[in-house]
Amino acid sequence: MRPAHIVFWVCVTFGGVWLQNLVPGVDFLAPGLILAMQEERWPVSVWLAFIWLFIHEGTGSMPFGAGILWYGALAGIYFFGHWLFEARNFLFMFILGASLGSMHFLLINIMALLQDWSLPMDRLLVECAQQTLIFPIEWGLLYLIHHYLPDNRHAA
């Protein structure tokens, strides 16, 4: 892996954690995982998923397993969807974002039920809408930045 790629993924990790602190309830690391899977460099994808999974599990207030379900479902939806759509299509990313928004609603409700929490439904719906809208935009920005990294065979 090239140094520019390592710096890119470190910046994505720190930026994603910082943005998740600013906008709670939205996963800013998920678009990076999709971008890593689109590169088809599986060791990089596995390592990033492993690190980001520990970040989610360690910093969140949900019981253990919510992050595993989140990233497992994200990978499953991506692998199923890229058979139907072009993997780098913005419409596919919007569908992935909508799926993540719906999955956020379902997963948070299930985990809150397990912990006997009551949730403000309006806040949860806002988080789902934010996840749906932010995901394709962030993926597009990450894709453009990654596409034009130095030493990239696609760079102009």
Image (spheres, rainbow, N blue to C red):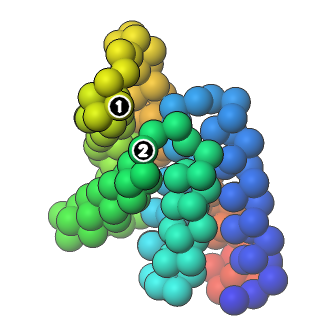
Q: Say left or right for 27 vs 148.
A: left
| Mark 1 closeness class: few <14, some 14–19, many ≥20 residues within 10 Å | few
Amino acid at the residue labelled 1: Gln
Residue under numbered circle 1:
115
Circle 2: element type = loop
Residue 150: image quadrant is bottom right
At 42% from the left and 44% from the top, the residue drawn is: 63
Expressed as whole percent of the image width and height from the top left, the position of residue 38 reads 45, 72
Image quarter of the C terminus: bottom right
Amino acid at the residue labelled 2: Pro
Q: Is residue 43 visible?
A: yes
Counting residues from the start of the chain, the first of labels 2 and 1 encountered is 2
Q: Is residue 134 visible?
A: no
Q: Nearer the viewer, residue 123 or 88?
A: 123
Residue under numbered circle 2:
63
At 75% from the left and 66% from the top, the residue drawn is: 10
